[in-house]
């Protein structure tokens, strides 16, 4: 799936999920015309599966990433549903779109942190795709490469026995940079999106889902995402994923650039 031919092909194969009445029928005509004046998508890699449940795990470096990936998934023929950090629901415009389209807020501390995973699993049981940002927050890596991941995406895939598909995108920073407060629209900018092959989780299936198993599988996922991003950027990814703890950075909230 590369270049301009990807989207027409996806339109031909859209299934019953997208034709089913939903809020997206109202949201798409309101958002897409303005968005299409601001963004030119270029799709690469494998096709997006047109049916069945799976977890899509992209990189995360801008607060507008959820909108970027939601529109990408819509253009590729599926209804986007994803886990997003709860603070994004407070961002003007972005937060309203997240709430109205049924996305799932994730509280990263406290007892509510597991509620989002249960909600995502319920969607999976209905045959839906779920987008999960495995980094859990905007990357702390200085050059916007993926940092180390959290285990939610892997846990859902292993618990439900469904594919886990790594993804990456690049170009979002031209619309809204990391920790930016201004969205730059109406100046059409390219965003490249690439989907990888499903991660081979066979060595982990059937094992107890302890931290050792989950962390090992998550490390493989983050390496796969970094490799996809390297293709888009045309440069090698760092050999190791950035760990905020090692670098004395806090896990949540803004960091000093």
Image (cartoon, helix red, strand yellow):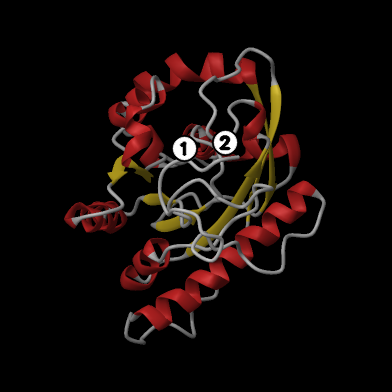
Image side of residue 117 versus residue 141, left or right: left
**x%, y% of residue 32?**
51, 20
Q: Visible in this render: residue 198?
A: no
Q: Badge 1: how crowded within 10 Å, few (<14), some, or many (20+)?
A: many
Q: Which one is nearer the viewer's eye here, 216 or 163?
A: 216
Find residue 88 and report its image quarter. Answer: top left
Q: Residue at 41%, 82% (x, y): give it.
A: 212
Q: Choose mark 1 or mark 2, whichever is in front.
A: 2
Residue under pointer 2 = 178
Q: Is residue 239 left or right of residue 245?
A: right
Residue at the spot x=47%, y=40% of the render? 254
Residue 68 shows in this picture: yes
Q: Is residue 218 left or right of residue 240?
A: left
Quadrant holding the C terminus: top right
In the rendered image, residue 128, in percent from the top left (x then y), is placed at: 35, 50
Dot 2 alpha-carbon crowd within 10 angstroms: few under 14, some 14 to 19, many 20 or more: many
Which SS class for mark 1?
helix
Question: Camera-side residue: 73 or 91?
Answer: 91
Q: CA distance from mark 1 to mark 2?
A: 13 Å
Vertical placement of residue 200 versus 140, above or below: below
Q: Residue at x 56, y 43 (%)?
A: 61
State the residue position of label 1: 66
- Taking the spot 63% from the left edge, 18% from the top edge, the residue there is 38
């Amino acid at each position: 799936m590369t270049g301009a031919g990807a989207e027409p092909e996806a339109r031909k194969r859209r299934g019953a999920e997208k034709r089913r009445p939903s809020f997206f029928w109202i949201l798409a005509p309101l958002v897409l015309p303005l968005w299409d004046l601001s963004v030119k998508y270029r799709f690469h890699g494998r096709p997006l599966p047109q049916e069945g449940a799976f977890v899509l795990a992209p990189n995360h470096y801008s607060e507008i990433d959820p909108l970027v990936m939601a529109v990408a998934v819509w253009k590729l023929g599926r209804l986007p549903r994803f886990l997003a950090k709860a603070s994004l629901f407070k961002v003007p415009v972005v937060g309203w779109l997240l709430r109205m389209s049924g996305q799932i807020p994730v509280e990263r501390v406290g007892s509510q942190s597991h509620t989002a995973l249960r909600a995502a699993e319920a969607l999976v049981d209905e045959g839906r795709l779920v987008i999960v940002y495995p980094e859990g927050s905007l990357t702390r890596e200085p050059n916007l490469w993926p940092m180390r991941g959290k285990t939610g995406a892997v846990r859902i895939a292993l618990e439900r026995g469904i594919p886990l598909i790594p993804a990456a995108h690049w170009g979002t920073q031209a619309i809204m940079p990391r920790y930016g407060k201004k969205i730059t629209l109406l100046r059409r900018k390219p965003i490249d999106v690439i989907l990888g092959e499903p991660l081979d989780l066979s060595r982990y299936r059937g094992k107890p889902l302890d931290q050792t198993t989950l962390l090992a599988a998550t490390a493989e996922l983050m390496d796969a995402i970094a490799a996809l991003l390297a293709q888009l950027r045309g440069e090698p990814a760092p050999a190791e994923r950035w760990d905020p703890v090692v670098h004395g950075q806090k896990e949540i909230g803004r960091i000093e650039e």
